Image (tube, rainbow, N blue to C red):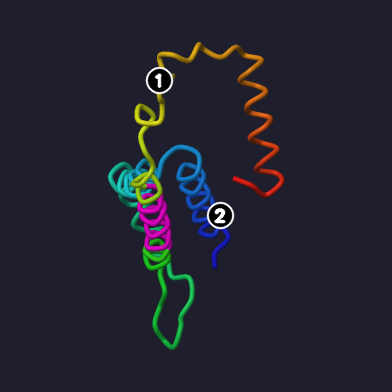
Amino acid sequence: MDQLSFLVFFLYTMMVLLILVYISPVVSVLLMIIIPAGSVYLLPEQAVQFLVMEQFSFMDVPIYNIHILLMVWSGLIGIAVYSELLSWYLLLDSPSVSQKKVAPAPDEPPKSPKDKIQDFLLRLGKIMSGGK
């Protein structure tokens, strides 16, 4: 593979993966589509020359940069969709924050920070010893 093409695809893939992990899968998919489309729109001759550059031939079938780009797209879109579906599924059954907060019983006085820490340590000791 041409070194420039390899570098361009490597940087493109790393940028999309970093955005996917640290920002959002939706933003990464949008950038995944906007960057090549924008390059074709802004620099049509250079982008077309880059995309139709033949990299190698497999069984007498030429493989161009556009084929490599489509392969990278399919892999990255699959990863983004999987991460979105997984996060949706994991958040599906968990109760919301408002449902988790339970008001203390009216006859029970509010706990002091010392009592809260003591209760926490007792629960932590039970969990560490194998109890619930």
Prevailing SS of the magenta stretch: helix
The circle on residue 47 is none
Q: CA distance from mark 2 to mark 1?
A: 57 Å
Please give the range of residues in magenta: 72-87
Q: Quadrant of residue 68?
A: bottom left
- The residue wearing badge 2 is 7
Q: Nearer the viewer, residue 92 or 36?
A: 92
Q: Is residue 49 magenta?
A: no
Amino acid type at image mark 2? Leu
Residue that extends furthest to the front in the rendered view of this protein: 107
Q: Is residue 80 magenta?
A: yes
Q: Height in image: 67 above or below 111?
A: below
The circle on residue 103 is 1
Q: Nearer the viewer, residue 119 or 92?
A: 119
Residue 15 image offset from top left, x and y in percent: 50, 45
Q: Nearer the viewer, residue 113 or 98?
A: 113
Residue 131 image offset from top left, x and y in percent: 64, 47
Count neighbours of disc 1 (C-alpha within 10 A) and say few if under 14, some if 14 to 19, many if 20 or more. Answer: few
